[in-house]
Image: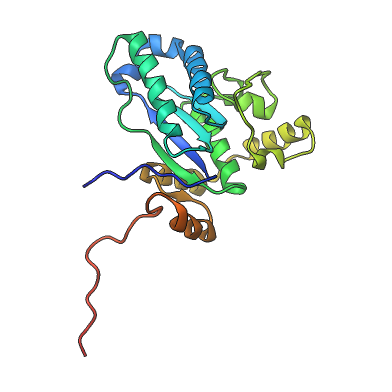
Amino acid sequence: MARLARLYAPDTTQLVQARLLPHIAQQAEVQAMKPQIARWLEQASGHYRLPIHAWSMTQDSIYLLSTPREPRSISQVVQAIGRHLASSLKQGAVFASRYRSCLVESGDYLLACMIWLEIYVHQQEGISHPDRLPWSSAGMHTGRLYQDIAWITDHETYWRLGNTPFERQARYRQLCEDGLSHAMSYKIQSILQGQWALGTEEFIATMSEVASRRVMPGQKGRPRKEDNK
């Protein structure tokens, strides 16, 4: 089966996962390099003009929430990180495959994706307080960890949570404490793995008109033949 073309729609946010190869992820050296990976991400996102709204790094993956200005911006940033990491480790490929991404509707779906990548994926690794991790933007958004991440551009959806930084942090902190439903976390994971669009029916219909390729799975099997009468 031919692999899908890269997904892109103008002015539309994407949730991104770049997964490390298992033997790379298991290296203690890689885990110790997380601060350096953050610096590479800062440099690459600035060079390729990619606004990043949230990010985190787990044992085996780098996650981003970003609104690319150009179709190739995300690819360029991920490739730059891969080159730096491969050079430092004196390895060939470091990522398990091409990165995965999905289009995300602003509003509740975008906030759910923020919580998913900043909190949920770390909880799945058994981490009790993900918003205290330095290799994530969670602490910046909840206010629980002082972080001066100048290269993070807060999405307008996050800005609408309050009139002041303290109000926004308090509201987002409460949303994180409330957590995601099992249905929502499963939906995000499934759509990210499939590389489709996450949102309302209206959003998906709009994306179907403007995106670089189809944004939802096609029907399986051959089309039904009409009965001849």
- Of all residues, the one furthest to the right in this rendering is 163
Q: For the point 46% across and 26% down, which residue is it?
A: 125
Task: State whether residue 12 is above or below residue 77.
Answer: below
- Of all residues, the one furthest to the bottom in this rendering is 229
Q: Is residue 139 left or right of residue 201?
A: right
Residue 117 horizontal/vertical position (percent) = 52, 33
Residue sitting nearer the eye, 138 or 100: 100
Q: For the point 42% across and 35% down, which residue is it?
A: 72
| Residue 218 position by quadrant | bottom left
Q: For the point 59% across and 25% down, which residue is it?
A: 137
Instruction: Report the number of discs.
Output: 0
Q: Is residue 100 left or right of residue 145?
A: left
Residue 224 horizontal/vertical position (percent) = 24, 73
Which color scheme is applied? Answer: rainbow
Residue 61 horizontal/vertical position (percent) = 41, 26
Residue 19 horizontal/vertical position (percent) = 37, 28
Quadrant for the C terminus, please.
bottom left
Task: State whether residue 184 is above or below residue 168.
Answer: below
Residue sitting nearer the eye, 122 or 34: 34
Residue sitting nearer the eye, 21 or 76: 76
Task: State whether residue 45 is above or below residue 217.
Answer: above
Q: Is residue 112 left or right of residue 74?
A: right
Q: For the point 40% across and 21% down, which residue is it?
A: 80
